[in-house]
Image (cartoon, helix red, strand yellow):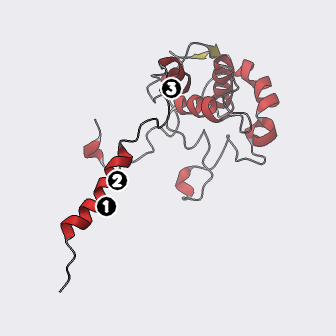
Amino acid sequence: MSTRNPALLAAAILIPMGAFAQTPNLGMPISEEEISAWNIDVSPDGTGLPPGSGTAIDGEPIYAQKCALCHGVNAEGGISLPLVGGEPLTTGIDAIKTIGNFWEYSTTIFDYTRRAMPWLTPRTLTDDEVYALTAYLLHINGIIEEDEVMNAETLPQVQMPNHDGFIVRYPELMP
């Protein structure tokens, strides 16, 4: 017969854990200004888009200078995947997914580009450059005209070719 008390064993384990949970001086307070510098996400409906604008005409030289090295001339692929073209997704799961055949929202292009590109120097593009690059990528995918201005009002209104191509797994959870 064991003489160990399970309650004492639990107390011996939980008391030190509680002490660690209340340890002061972990991290440091952050200001609203510091938070806002990182709070740059953009929702599908355009919530979070900043002021600024650009056209595909403006975006073409920016693409050539800051994007073509990885994504290739005319975004047809290089060391990174292509951003233009692609077979219809009905050809199978292995079809290359591009802006023209996969992306559901135009605002996702802006959001991703703004936060993650250029790959080696993310967050170095101005908002106007991101709008112009987004317009350029939409244009070379045949979605908008080269002189259409993309901004916080017009970008969310762009209808993507695959907008209705997604199947909601749990529709009962949708608002």
Q: CA distance from mark 3 to mark 2?
A: 33 Å
Q: Is residue 37 left or right of residue 86?
A: left
**Residue furthest to the bottom:** 1
**Residue furthest to the front:** 3
Question: Residue at image x 22%, y 65%?
Answer: 8
Seen from the viewer's position, the closer of residues 161 and 54 is: 54
> What's the amino acid at mark 3?
Asn
Question: Residue at image x 60%, y 39%?
Answer: 100
> What's the amino acid at mark 1?
Ile
- Residue 10 to residue 161: above or below: below
Question: Is any atom of residue 112 visible in this view?
Answer: yes
Q: Which residue is mark 2?
A: 17
Question: Is any atom of residue 168 visible in this view?
Answer: no
Dot 1 or dot 3, earlier in sequence: 1
Q: Quadrant of the N terminus?
A: bottom left
Check residue 60 in the rendering and tell me which mark sits there, or answer none. Answer: none
Q: Which residue is mark 1?
A: 13
Indicate the secondary structure of the residue bearing disc 1. Answer: helix
Q: Residues within 10 Å of mark 1 (few under 14, many from 20)?
A: few
Dot 3 or dot 2, earlier in sequence: 2
Indicate the secondary structure of the residue bearing disc 3. Answer: loop
Q: Which residue is mark 3?
A: 39
Of labels 3 and 2, the one closer to you: 2
Q: Is residue 115 left or right of residue 59?
A: left
- Residue 27 to residue 90: above or below: above
Give x and y (percent) for residue 80.
73, 47
Give x and y (percent) for residue 154.
53, 17
> What's the amino acid at mark 2?
Met
Q: CA distance from mark 1 to mark 2?
A: 7 Å
Of labels 1 and 3, the one closer to you: 1
